[in-house]
Image: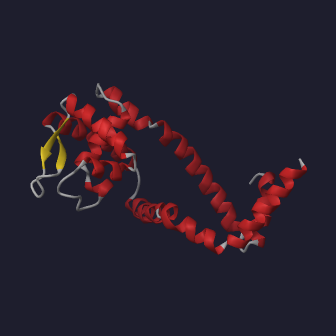
């Protein structure tokens, strides 16, 4: 562990976090930051579009996948009918952006609008056979690569990783807020100390 992290480790100890836990968090954070930089580039998505020769950008592909709503990404029981607002919610994007992309996909023949079967006032969106063929091919591409990588892992390694990764994924949703609430006084002191140090520079 770099010496420049020693003070951080000591600070965390005064906050009640053991040194070994902080060292583990530092190592874990390093892995996540490397992963985040690669994910932000969307390397796998770009490769899929390029190698499959698809005339789409990643935003359009994301919307097509959100329309189809695979259960591993969006739950076992997605809504029976998908509207533009549903797509926006699934991708956490602005409804106007979702609407623009859906309209473009419709113009290009990858998606289509239809009247709702449960409420004639609602308009739903679905993939056309061309759109579905693309989504299925991209998913097969992704899982050929991911499955090929994981095929060298033991069942025990996979059984260990998945629940822990799922557990950590919930930290971003609720755990960070809960942790912050428990450390609010120390975070306040950190903020005040930073303001003081900056004012002295």
Residue 140, visible in the rendered structure: yes
On screen, residue 107 versus residue 180, left or right, reads: left
Residue 121: image location, x then y, percent: 14, 52
Q: Residue furthest front?
A: 121
Residue 141, visible in the rendered structure: no
Q: Which residue is at the front of the view, 132 or 164?
A: 132
Q: Which residue is at the front of the view, 17 or 110?
A: 110
Q: How many marks?
A: 0
Q: Quadrant of residue 118?
A: bottom left
Q: Is residue 91 above or below residue 185?
A: above
- Where is the N terminus found, in terms of image quarters? bottom right
On screen, residue 37 versus residue 166, left or right, reads: right
The residue located at (47%, 60%) in the rendering is 169
Residue 193: image location, x then y, percent: 82, 61
Q: Which residue is at the front of the view, 143 or 102?
A: 102
The residue located at (44%, 35%) in the rendering is 43
Q: Quadrant of residue 26?
A: bottom right
Q: Is residue 170 above or below residue 117?
A: below
Q: Residue furthest right?
A: 200
Q: How is the image coloured?
A: secondary structure
Residue 155: image location, x then y, percent: 37, 60
The residue located at (71%, 66%) in the rendering is 187
């Amino acid at each position: 562990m770099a010496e420049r992290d020693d003070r951080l480790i000591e600070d965390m100890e005064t906050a009640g976090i053991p040194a070994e836990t902080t060292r583990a968090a530092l190592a874990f954070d390093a892995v996540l930051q490397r992963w985040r930089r690669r994910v932000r580039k969307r390397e796998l998505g770009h490769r899929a579009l390029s190698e499959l020769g698809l005339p789409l950008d990643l935003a359009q592909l994301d919307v097509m996948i959100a329309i189809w709503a695979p259960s591993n990404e969006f739950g076992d029981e997605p809504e029976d009918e998908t509207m533009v607002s549903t797509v926006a919610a699934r991708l956490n994007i602005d409804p106007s952006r979702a609407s623009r992309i859906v309209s473009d996909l419709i113009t290009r023949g990858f998606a289509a609008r239809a009247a709702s079967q449960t409420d004639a006032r609602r308009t739903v969106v679905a993939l056309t056979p061309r759109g579905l063929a693309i989504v299925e091919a991209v998913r097969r591409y992704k899982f050929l690569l991911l499955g090929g990588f994981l095929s060298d892992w033991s069942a025990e390694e996979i059984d260990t990783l998945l629940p822990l990764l799922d557990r950590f994924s919930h930290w971003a949703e609720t755990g960070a807020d809960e942790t912050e609430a428990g450390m609010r006084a120390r975070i306040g002191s950190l903020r005040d100390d930073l303001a003081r140090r900056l004012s002295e520079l």
